Amino acid sequence: MRPAILLLFLLLSTAVSTAWSQPCQKLHTSSKKAEKLYRRAMERSREAMAPGADKEAARQDVEADLLKCLDIDPEFAEAERVMATLLFDAGAFEASRDRYAHYLTAHGGDFIRDHFAWAESARHALDPLSMKQAMNAMQAIPGVMEGPDVERIGRVMKDAEFMSEALQRPVPIAPEPLPSPVSTMEDEYFPSVWLAGEALVFTRKVEDARWQQGQEDLFVTRRNVDGWGVPQPLRGLNTLANEGAASLSGDGMTLCFTVCREPDRPGQGAHKGSCDLYISQQVGGQWSTPFNLEGVNSPAWESQPCLSPDGQSLYFTRGSGKPGRRKYDLFVARRGADGQWGQGIRLGGAINSNGVEMRPFIHPDGRHFYFASDGRPGMGGMDLFVSTMDGNGQWGEPVNLGWPLNTPDDESGLVVASDGTTAYFSREVDGQLDLHALTLPKGASADPTAAMEGRLLDPAGRGLSGGRVNLVDRLTGEPFATAETASDGRYHVPVPMDRAFVVLAEAPGHLLHSESMEVGMAEGRIERDIVLEPLRTGVEVVLRNVFFDSGSAELDAESHAELARVGAWLEAHPTIRVEVGGHTDDVGSDTANLTLSQQRAERVEQALRQAGADAGQMEAKGYGRSQPAAEGTSEEARRQNRRTALRVISAGG
């Protein structure tokens, strides 16, 4: 964030730094008149600190006196120093840069750390060469390279190098602020997008006499044919405390958000720190009473949550240490089989740096991770980065999203809709935080995803709680998304649009359900209720993702994904006994088909044993073409008849 230079700074400006801490006793002017004007400007700034003082009028008076000082003595370093600061605060970055350069070129040894202000004004002027010039001048001062600022100088130099390259290769991005009624004179930030952008939940800072800097509340705006609707407060969640930085689940039924009490006041009850994470569920159109994520929260500062696409992981920011000296890193907590959240674990790999990392967002594709950081070379302030998961499940080296998305000011809170390209974030412009929208270019965008949602039901239409819907890659056999059902059996799971996968649904006391999804079948939002048969003798399920080559008992490579999961399911239910039934179509003789079906059943049984099932749980039987699932001789009928089924022989105890 570009620092606002308060008039308090003017009060401190009379003490001029000769090294890192020692004041210079004599002003850099021989003119008594200039010195008198300078001291009058400093006194005027003191008066402006009184309650009710007209600070803008005071700023104008101070600036007028400083300009008179510099007319009398252009080499009056202290006056030019304060003038450079005022110009920076007014957004006149080139003029500020030139003022810093002028007096520091002559008196740099007396104002050593002012070289960082010189570089900062050059940064905001988009002048990386002057950034380097400022740091080179600082390094040339005797003793600097043996002092405490070496690392900071190096960071500024790396930022200048990055900016130089970024300005030469701008990214084709054109962020636009969201119009009224979303944008107001208040600050709006930390958006959370629902799927393809049907709604945005965001934080708004509203005026409140109890809080010097305002109070944070949660609002939601919904997209309609005319654009974004009037934002509404999230009733039932906003309180007299600060609520903000929310994450909406894919189905819109769960909201994880931050509640902050008075700054760094000890927690009370379940509330552990100044800021804790809470979760609320939408029930009957109303948000339930939020509950504290006690397993995740700590006496530190937790905020800015992001629920993973499958709802099993929670990414968030934790600030450790005393206020003003906190170290902000990104953490993740996992949800256990019992539904409880475990403790937060600091993200490893390349995500966290020695700087500040904030506002994580994982896209529904599960592979693209966006966050803000000031710990890597960039344009300045908090820049936006993306990390992509590699084939080993590790997050890769973060990539700066470049200019003009990133600027010398703060950018944060990037979220990306399910299409992988529509994004929203918050940006500060002239001290005002607003939500912005943009279209991500190739290289920064995520993979497009759809969504499958509905309910797991028993045959009577009752919702099954405690169930799971697992998506398994057909080629690798690796599960990549899991959704747990709510109390009414409702589930929501993001699905890829660019690969084939297996859908396996299960619930306690019920038989597995199997489906196959081909590339391109998933688009938009797929409404699908899945009925699971109770575990009782005689019920049967078709393994729809088990394939054989024509006339062969050799399993196709894409069959292993489903068989691995079914074998693991049988291993987890050791009292169940099933028949593995092989069925063929009507092509060929009865004898040949009977033999082939028996061989296929035995091959599936073998694969299930290899996946964990016990041999005593299964028996293989071939039925040939004697039990067709569909009548007729069409290719579709024959496809349905060529199948492998599991029939429960005994459900066990």
Image (cartoon, rainbow, N blue to C red):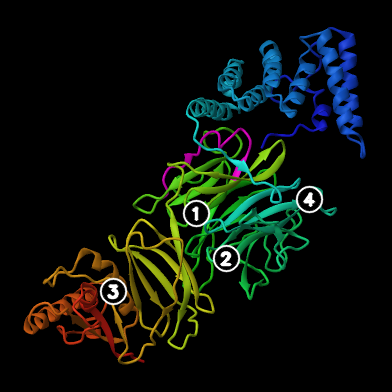
Indicate which disc, 4 or 1, sits on the residue closer to the N terminus. 4
Marks 2 and 3, Cα distance to the nearest angstrom? 31 Å
> Mark 4 falls on what kind of element?
loop
Residue type at mark 3: give it.
Answer: Arg
Give coordinates of residue 13: x percent, y percent. Answer: 80, 24
Magenta region: 395-412
Residue receiving disc 3: 544
Residue type at mark 4: give it.
Answer: Gly
Indicate which disc, 3 or 4, sits on the residue closer to the N terminus. 4
Q: Residue at x 86, y 19 (%)?
A: 64
- Neighbours of disc 3 within 10 Å: few (<14), some (14-19), many (20+): some
Residue receiving disc 1: 362
Residue receiving disc 2: 252
Indicate which disc, 2 or 3, sits on the residue closer to the N terminus. 2
Marks 3 and 1, Cα distance to the nearest angstrom? 31 Å
Quarter location, residue 242: bottom right
Residues tagged 4 and 2 counted as in contact (Cβ below 8 A): no
Residues tagged 3 and 4 counted as in contact (Cβ below 8 A): no
Indicate which disc, 3 or 1, sits on the residue closer to the N terminus. 1
Indicate which disc, 4 or 2, sits on the residue closer to the N terminus. 4
Give coordinates of residue 142: x percent, y percent. Answer: 61, 15
Give coordinates of residue 439: x percent, y percent. Answer: 52, 44
Pick the quarter of the image with the N terminus: top right
- Neighbours of disc 4 within 10 Å: few (<14), some (14-19), many (20+): some
Q: Nearer the viewer, residue 338 or 388?
A: 388
> Mark 3 falls on what kind of element?
loop
Quarter location, residue 81: top right
Residue type at mark 2: give it.
Answer: Gly
Residue 214 disc label: 4
